[in-house]
Amino acid sequence: EVRLVESGGALVQPGGSLRLSCAASGFTFSDHYMDWVRQAPGKGLEWVGRSRNRANSYTTDYAASVKGRFTISRDVSENSLYLQMTSLKTEDTAVYYCTRGYCDTTGYQGLDYWGQGTLVTVSS
Amino acid sequence: QPVLTQPPSASGTPGQRVTISCSGSSSNIGDNFVYWFQQLPGTAPKLLFYKNNQRPSGVPDRFSGSKSGTSASLAISGLRSEDEADYFCAAWDGSLSEVFFGGGTKLTVL
C-alpha cells in the first residue's frame, strides 16, 4: 500500500525557516517523481516544486513564487522527501501536500498519491 | 491573469451532464498533457485523469476528459450527489518550467 506521511508543519514567524518531511512507503521511492503542492486556507492548489526520479538524475524544478527560498531534497536510503523553506512569508501559509508523480516505462503519469498534508502558518 | 482558467463554479441536478472547462495557452495545454483532480470537502485531492483522458483505476466511466488545442474539458454524466467537490485542472508549462493548476471549479449538485 502506498503511503505518504508529511510532518514538520508549525507556526513560524515571517523571515523564519522550516523543514517539512514526507515519509514514503509501499513503492520504490527512486522510481518516481515527488512533488510538493500547497493549498492556502480556502484557496486552490498551488504547485511548489518537483524532485524527478533517479532515471532523471533527481533534478528539481520550483514555482517562481518559491524559487531561491525553498529547496526539495530526498534521502533515498530513508525513503524520505524534504522541503526546506527559508525566508518565509505570510503568503506561504498553507497546507503542504507531499505527492507521488507516478512513472512507468512510458514516462510520467501524474500525481497519483497524496499525503494528508501538514499545515504551515507564517505569522508574527 | 491565471495561467490556467477555470469557471469558479458549476452546478447540475442529479442525472444531468456537466462540463468544466480549462483554458490555457500553447506553452502549457497546447504542448503538454492535462491532468484533472477531484477534491472532496476536507480531503486531499485525488487524480481523476492523466494524460488528457486516461482514467486511473477506480474512477467511474461517468467521468471523461478531453483536450483540444489550448483547452481541456472534464465532463461528468449521470451526476450524483457524491460528485459535489472542487475540480482542478493542471498542466506543465514548458516556457516557465512549472506545473500550473487551474483556479478550481466548485461543483454543486442541486
Image (cartoon, rainbow, N blue to C red):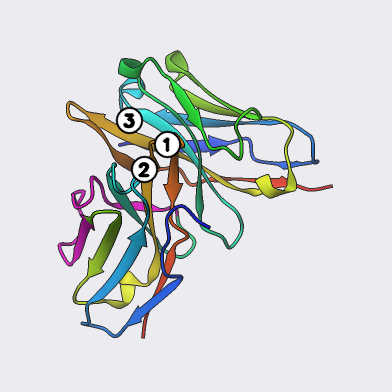
Both labels 3 and 1 in a single chain: no
Which type of secondary structure does the marked residue at label 3 adopt? loop
Q: Amino acid at mark 2?
A: Ser
Rendered view: B100 above or below B89: above
Rendered view: A34 above or below A94: above
Magenta region, main secondary structure: loop
Q: Please give the residue where the numbered disc 1 appears in the rendered image.
A: B95
**Nearer the viewer's eye, disc 3 or disc 1?**
1
What chain letter is assigned to the residue under label 1?
A: B
| Comes first in the chain, label 1 or label 2 | 2
What chain letter is assigned to the residue under label 2?
A: B
Q: Nearer the viewer, residue B1 or A106?
A: B1
Q: Please give the residue where the numbered disc 3 appears in the rendered image.
A: A26
Q: Residue at 79% of width from left, 41% of height from top?
A: A14
Magenta-colored stretch includes residue A63: no
Counting from the top left corner in percent of width and height, residue A106 is at 17, 29
Q: Residue at 41% of width from left, 31% of height from top?
A: A34
Which type of secondary structure does the marked residue at label 2 adopt? loop
Q: Please give the residue where the numbered disc 2 appears in the rendered image.
A: B27
| CB-based contact (under 8 Å), mark 1 and mark 2 | yes
Q: Amino acid at mark 1?
A: Ser
Q: Amino acid at mark 3?
A: Gly
Q: Nearer the viewer, residue A22 or B1?
A: B1
Circle count:
3
Q: Is residue B63 left or right of residue A42?
A: left
Q: Is residue A64 left or right of residue B55?
A: right
Q: Magenta stretch?
A: B44-67
